[in-house]
Amino acid sequence: MRLRLAGAALLAAAAAYYIYLPLPNGVCEPWKLMLLDAVFRPTLLACEIAHQLGLCHRIHVLNRLVYMVEDVDARSCAAVQVTDTLLGGIPTRVFHPKGGGELKRAVLYYHGGGWALGSMRMTSFDYVCRTMAEDLDAVVMSVNYRLVPEAVFPDQYEDAMAAARAFLSQEAFERYGIDPERTCVSGDSAGGNLAAAVSQGLAVDDTQQVKFKIQALIYPVLQTLDFHTSSYQQNHGVPILYRHIMIRFWLQYLGGDSSLEPVLLANNHSSLDEPAVTAAMRSRVNWTALLPPTERAKPFKPLVRKTGTPGVVGRLPALTDVRAAPLLAESEVLSRTPKAYVLTCEFDVLRDDGLMYVRRLQDAGVDVTNDHLVDGFHGCMVYSRLPMLSSVGWRSLKSYIRWLDQNL
């Protein structure tokens, strides 16, 4: 009996040691986040082993595992008709509220996942879009753009743009009963990146007759030049998005070699001796000037290399392409984009990307609402359908929908 108790105690201690992860003070329900991370870590390790052994690409393994528990067919319910179709040739899931003959407001949504993971079929994204459609009495379309590794930049952007143009067409307005004066482009994380880039691209396209009225970005990823912003430094080891994982996502998306990971991690790609990174570009990601005073007051210092690894941007020019990194857009472009909502989370490496974009939009004269979750972490909205896992996920979804309801 004593041996069993001792063994149980040792197992419990080992489990606690494995699960425990030092997290910053203030993160929402830290032990729940630790438990989630404890599940992710061995999953990522298994994917990496399979990749290194040449059995399967790490992304394919991870997506298959995700789809085993997160795949759902287009299921209608009492309030919403759900169908899978094509929008501009891109697979799209349409959530259409039942009843009512009046024209409806509409949201075009791009899911997150580092341009590599997820789909419109994932239960989490299906739930977010279904909830939007029901609560807002709005048509919601979730775009299934192509993913890494089969597709790399600009494929995802082009898919997103093709879907957006079809969404804003007279054909779509008539088919789905959409009010062309009440349209929104939105997305989370990598999807927020696509939403911002599409919003910019259409805003300056004078051939596009109907344009989005608002944009709503959920913890968007927006820049490639500085991986030592205050938020990258503060949250580099906070799940579910570690700094090195975000850099890996960027390299996979932009078609870069994995050998560049330590170069980007050290900011050697954007050193002062890199001529392809202009002074104007540097000013657009200068977080010491663009962040609110409360964020600038934190004890983090910028990392600007005088000399780095020469020619990285020449080898990977997409690093400075505004279609991939919307924060680098010129003010004249930003000034033509629609009214914006940007949700940021305190415990997210991408926090400063969003906060800098808020400031640059404001400076360009755009009406912007920044919804900052002081206890939030990256990806929290994914867990909105399971509030027992994280209450901040449910709160983030409700706050996001509230803003849409008031502004769309």
Image (cartoon, rainbow, N blue to C red):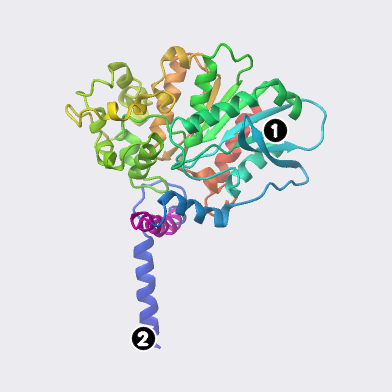
Q: x, y (%) of residue 131?
A: 66, 41
Q: Secondary structure at mark 2?
A: helix
| Mark 1 Cα-neighbour bin, 10 Å: few <14, some 14–19, many ≥20 | many
Magenta stretch bounds: 33-54
In this rendering, the count of numbered labels is 2
Q: Quadrant of residue 84?
A: top right
Q: Type of residue at label 1? A: Val
Disc 2 and disc 1: Cα gap in Å? 61 Å
Which comes sooner in the sequence, label 2 or label 1?
Answer: 2
Left or right of residue 304, residue 106 in this image: right
Is any atom of residue 11 visible in this view? yes
Q: x, y (%) of residue 180?
A: 69, 20
Q: Secondary structure at mark 1?
A: strand
Is 111 in front, or is 166? 166
Pointer 2: what residue? 3
Name the front one of labels 2 and 1. Answer: 1
